[in-house]
């Protein structure tokens, strides 16, 4: 007897759990928004700030990020490199997805086990957080264990969906296997003994054995041998790295990391797995509890609460319909210039970037609004899609920027200062993109037919229609510049204002609000599990003193700053061809940032330059995310047309990096004025 995967009781149960954790995370997100807005009201209106809002909001963030992982997995929201997957036929793609799912599941088994150990030990020891609330630490850590367990189940459900012809008896057999594995770990205790006199404990071997049995039970001996082959190859390489020189260690870690990413293992799980291998094979005495501790430490930060607030603000404004009106206003004001509609698209990208914080959202929104309009008016597909692909990158440069929040929290740079530093370079890029459009339209008039004229009354009316979004941008950036609000507070108030705008425009009801909240949960979750994976990965870097050794090597080589910057730029441009921007940043910064500081670069300046380099990656083939977003929206426009169209803009962005190196004041002058004023 076979069971079609949609009818599998196991799949239905796990899907129900994934939806429940998604709804719970959405509710917690709304709660966080309310808490932060309440604290702002108490602080600035009643002059009676709360003593609990900051701390509780941070714990809620941890819960949202981890509990949302199962829902994000269910809607295929976790980021992976799909270069290989996209070039396979359906059967081969399904088989590879099975292999990568099992590989990721092994990491989640280890991570979930250690999360339970961490929570249990902190409960038994009565450990508390030294804060105003003196919170028992195990309480906010419980969502980590629950979230990883739900994530693992959601990944199992995905494996089940990829195996529609599986015999029905294998579902309860898998449940029984999970129970046996959990019981065995419980009997071994929190710190299992070492096995056979090796550095590996019995608990780790128990999980590895259980994983092999699970793959064999559900996916057969071919998939089992493939998964085992990947792990054996990776383990052998890491074993060779033990005791080797630092160059060999870095090379082996890079090869295994890029190999897992190329296979299509979700980025967060691939990074975490490399960190797991480093802990077991590169450290003299493996300490798997580090996996759970790094998961907690990497996202237990109030600074990061700004991420979901700005993502929520952008998602709400997307539903408000103002994006259409912004583009319409730009068309009325810029339409008569050569390439006027493309100017309007770039300008609208700049405005929307100032409220979304996401390049993906900016490209998708303007791709739906501006590109069809340009094609309808006879614009060249290359110019239409190239300009919007480039304009979409502004979402992570013009504040607020999710990438800058993560950069600042990673290296310890002030988020508000980073936001302000991105304004001038962002405006210059907008003007530069418009210059490219103008030159293109002048040289090839057929690619950009002129638009009709509009009278001043029509132009004025168009500006009045976008007054709400203009005031919102001014309020958020003004509060940051004046130093009267933290990025989190500015983001929360901006999200609340966006909510009111949606309500006032009749664009928000219960189902729509739930959709917006779930979208924000998905983005927050996949970003934060990437941060967790990168934090686990870099543990072995820290232990091996890799950043220090790299700085010493550069000093010994007597390299000039421009040579170091050139090497870093080339590295990020190449990585951007294959890896998404956030993964690339959190993976490399722990190693490269000490070098950046050592050669004398300003951290704020480097943050702006890094974001532009990541922007170039967003439009660089073969996996520039913005290119794929627009290809998906374009219908029958070939990918090569979009790629050809984006090349002039990509060259301009490279020139912008050179300009910022020559004139760093473009990024540092405005923040300096903010500091002086403050």
Image: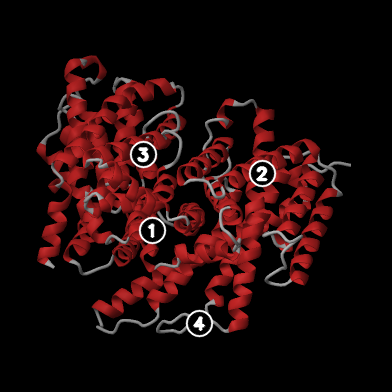
Please indicate whether residue 546 sits to the left or right of residue 536 in the image: left
Q: Which residue is mark 3?
A: 572
Q: Which dot, 1 or 2, sits closer to the camera?
A: 2
Q: Which residue is at 52% across, 44% downward?
A: 253
- Upstream in sequence: badge 1 or badge 4: 4
The spot of residue 386 in percent (x, y) is: 32, 28
Horizontal side of 599 relative to 39 (left or right) equals: left
- Label at residue 231: 2
Which residue is at 31% across, 67% downward? 489
How far apart are the alpha carbons under marks 4 and 3? 41 Å
Q: Mark 1 sits on what residue? A: 307
Mark 2 lies on a secondary structure that is helix
Residue 432 falls in which quadrant of the image? top left
**Image quarter (top left, top right, bottom left or bottom right) of the C terminus:** bottom left
Mark pair 3, 1: CA separation: 23 Å
Closer to viewer: mark 1 or mark 4: 4
Say which label, 3 or 1, has the lower sequence index: 1
Residue that mark 4 sits on: 128
Q: Earlier in the sequence, mark 2 or mark 3?
A: 2
Residue 438: x and y, percent? 17, 25
Report the quarter where the N terminus lies.
Answer: top right
């Amino acid at each position: 007897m076979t069971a079609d995967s949609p009818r599998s009781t196991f799949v239905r149960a796990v899907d129900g759990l994934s939806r429940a954790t998604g709804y719970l995370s959405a509710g917690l997100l709304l709660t966080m928004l309310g808490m932060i807005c309440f604290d702002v009201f108490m602080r600035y209106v009643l002059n009676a700030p709360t003593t609990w809002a900051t701390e509780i909001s941070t714990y809620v963030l941890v819960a949202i990020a981890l509990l949302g992982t199962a829902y994000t997995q269910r809607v295929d929201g976790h980021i992976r490199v799909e270069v290989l997957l996209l070039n396979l036929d359906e059967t081969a793609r399904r088989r590879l997805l099975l292999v990568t799912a099992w590989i990721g599941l092994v990491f989640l088994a280890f991570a979930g086990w250690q999360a339970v150990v961490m929570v249990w030990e902190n409960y038994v020891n009565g450990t508390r957080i030294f804060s105003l609330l003196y919170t028992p630490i195990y309480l906010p850590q419980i969502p980590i264990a629950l979230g990883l367990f739900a994530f693992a189940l959601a990944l199992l459900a995905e494996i089940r969906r990829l195996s529609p012809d599986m015999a029905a008896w294998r579902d309860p057999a898998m449940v029984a296997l999970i129970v046996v594995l959990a019981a065995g770990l419980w009997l071994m205790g929190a710190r299992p003994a070492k096995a056979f006199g090796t550095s590996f404990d019995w608990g780790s071997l128990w999980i590895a054995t259980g994983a092999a049995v699970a793959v064999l039970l559900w996916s057969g001996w071919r998939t089992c041998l493939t998964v085992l082959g990947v792990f054996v190859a990776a383990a052998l390489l890491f074993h060779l790295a033990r005791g080797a020189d630092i160059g060999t260690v870095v090379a082996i870690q890079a090869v295994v990391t890029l190999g897992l990413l190329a296979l299509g293992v979700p980025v967060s799980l691939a990074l975490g797995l490399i960190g797991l291998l480093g802990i077991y094979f590169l450290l003299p005495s493996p300490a798997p509890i580090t996996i759970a501790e790094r998961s907690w430490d990497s996202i237990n930060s109030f600074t990061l609460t700004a991420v979901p607030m700005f993502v929520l603000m952008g998602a709400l404004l997307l539903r408000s319909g103002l994006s259409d009106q912004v583009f319409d206003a730009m068309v009325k004001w810029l339409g008569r210039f050569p390439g006027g509609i493309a100017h309007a698209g770039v300008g609208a990208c700049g405005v929307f970037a100032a409220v979304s914080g996401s390049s993906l959202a900016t490209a998708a929104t303007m791709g739906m609004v501006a590109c069809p309009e340009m094609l309808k008016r006879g614009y060249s597909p290359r110019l239409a899609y190239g300009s919007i692909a480039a304009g979409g990158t502004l979402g992570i440069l013009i504040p607020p920027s999710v990438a800058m929040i993560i950069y600042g929290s990673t290296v310890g740079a002030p988020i508000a200062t980073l936001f302000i530093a991105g304004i001038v370079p962002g405006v210059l890029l907008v003007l530069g993109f418009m210059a490219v459009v103008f030159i293109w339209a002048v040289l090839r008039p057929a690619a950009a037919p002129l638009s009709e004229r509009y009278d001043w009354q029509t132009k004025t009316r168009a500006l009045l229609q976008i007054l709400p979004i203009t005031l919102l941008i001014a309020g958020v950036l003004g509060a940051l510049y004046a130093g009267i609000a933290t990025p989190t507070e500015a983001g929360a108030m901006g999200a609340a204002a966006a909510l009111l705008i949606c309500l006032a425009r009749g664009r928000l009801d219960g189902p729509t609000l739930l959709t917006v909240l779930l979208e924000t949960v998905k983005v927050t979750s996949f970003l934060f599990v990437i941060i967790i994976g990168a934090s686990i990965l870099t543990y072995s870097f820290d232990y091996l003193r890799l950043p220090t050794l790299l700085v010493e090597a550069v000093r010994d080589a007597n390299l000039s700053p421009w040579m170091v910057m050139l090497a870093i730029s080339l590295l990020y441009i190449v990585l951007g061809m294959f890896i998404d921007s956030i993964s690339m940043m959190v993976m490399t910064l722990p190693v490269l940032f000490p070098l950046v500081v050592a050669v004398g670069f300003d951290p704020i300046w480097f943050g702006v330059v890094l974001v532009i380099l990541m922007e170039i990656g967003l439009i660089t083939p073969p996996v520039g995310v913005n290119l794929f977003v627009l290809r998906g929206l374009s219908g029958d426009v070939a990918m090569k047309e979009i790629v050809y169209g984006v090349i002039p803009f990509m060259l301009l962005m490279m020139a912008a990096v050179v300009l910022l190196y020559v004139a760093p004041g473009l990024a540092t002058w405005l923040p300096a004025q903010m500091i002086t004023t403050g």
